[in-house]
Amino acid sequence: MNLNGPPYPYTEKDWSQWYPFVSKAGRGCATELQAIHDSLQLLQGSDGDESEVVSRQKRWVSQSMLPWTIRELPGLKSDNEADRFIGAITIERGTFLYILDEDERRRRKQENNALDAGDRNIIWEVGFYLVPKYHGRGIMPAVLRTLIKHILVPYMNVHTLMATYFEYNTPSRRVFEKCGFEFLQLLPDAITLPPTKNNGITGRKVGLGVMRWQLA
Ligand SMILES: CC(C)(COP(=O)(O)OP(=O)(O)OC[C@H]1O[C@@H](n2cnc3c(N)ncnc32)[C@H](O)[C@@H]1OP(=O)(O)O)[C@@H](O)C(=O)NCCC(=O)NCCS
């Protein structure tokens, strides 16, 4: 109910449209990251800090969407299930949800999508969720910090990462704050909730908080 994206209820048809798309993006991303990682290893000659060789790197991830699953490793499990799915985090080129004028939003998206991989001016965006049982343990801040440090900066040259949250979603805002994002603005009544996400009531609007992370 805190997410703008996935439809609710989530039907078989939703899955059959979404899964091939996200699965392809995930595979493309894994292949590309591995190739870049291998070339970094050659540059480094050892397992050093990726950030040290960024300035010499010429290849960047070209995918416009990077979807990740978050898993509990067998060594950390509290029950007998191994490698359990506990959530997801997606990095993608900006959707500019916080630009309310549709023409202007479309124009910004086109402009942003046209930038070459590795361009520091690309506006990226992050979204995430965790299975409720895992809330409140500091997992998402750790995941996001790790992604920024070990993937987004060294493999993608990310300089600006945007995020939005429904105004009442304080846990989400706290995650961003803990990861060094700054609060930019609250847009009142920016999103109209579908009735299925609002007890069947049509037309309820919700404010959108906007957060930004920038490479120091
Ligand atoms: C938002 C979310 C990813 C936070 O991840 P997390 O790993 O639980 O993050 P943290 O453990 O650092 O908790 C963040 C803050 O929320 C609070 N919190 C966590 N779970 C909570 C809950 N169920 N109810 C109320 N507060 C909660 C924590 O106390 C913490 O605040 P604090 O650091 O000031 O004490 C997680 O709550 C979630 O998946 N929510 C549903 C999906 C969602 O809202 N996604 C974001 C859309 S923008």
Image: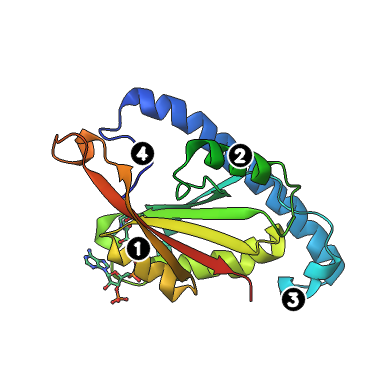
| Residue 107, numbered circle | 2
Q: Quadrant of residue 55?
A: bottom right
**Residue 195 placement, left or right of 138:** left
Using the image, determine if residue 105 lies above or below residue 134.
above
Q: Give the amino acid at mark 2.
A: Arg
Q: Give the amino acid at mark 4.
A: Pro
Q: Earlier in the sequence, mark 4 or mark 3?
A: 4
Q: Earlier in the sequence, mark 2 or mark 4?
A: 4
Q: Residues within 10 Å of mark 4 (few under 14, many from 20)?
A: few
**Residue 20 placement, left or right of 137:** right
Q: Quadrant of residue 135?
A: bottom left
For label 4, the residue is 6
Q: Whole-Å distance between the Cαs marked 2 and 4?
A: 24 Å
| Residue 63, position as x, y percentages in the image | 66, 44
| Residue 48, numbered circle | 3
65 or 45: which is nearer to us?
Answer: 65
Find numbered disc 3 in the image and state the secondary structure of the residue it sits on: loop
**Residue 138 placement, left or right of 200:** right
Q: Give the amino acid at mark 3.
A: Gly
Q: Give the amino acid at mark 1.
A: Ser
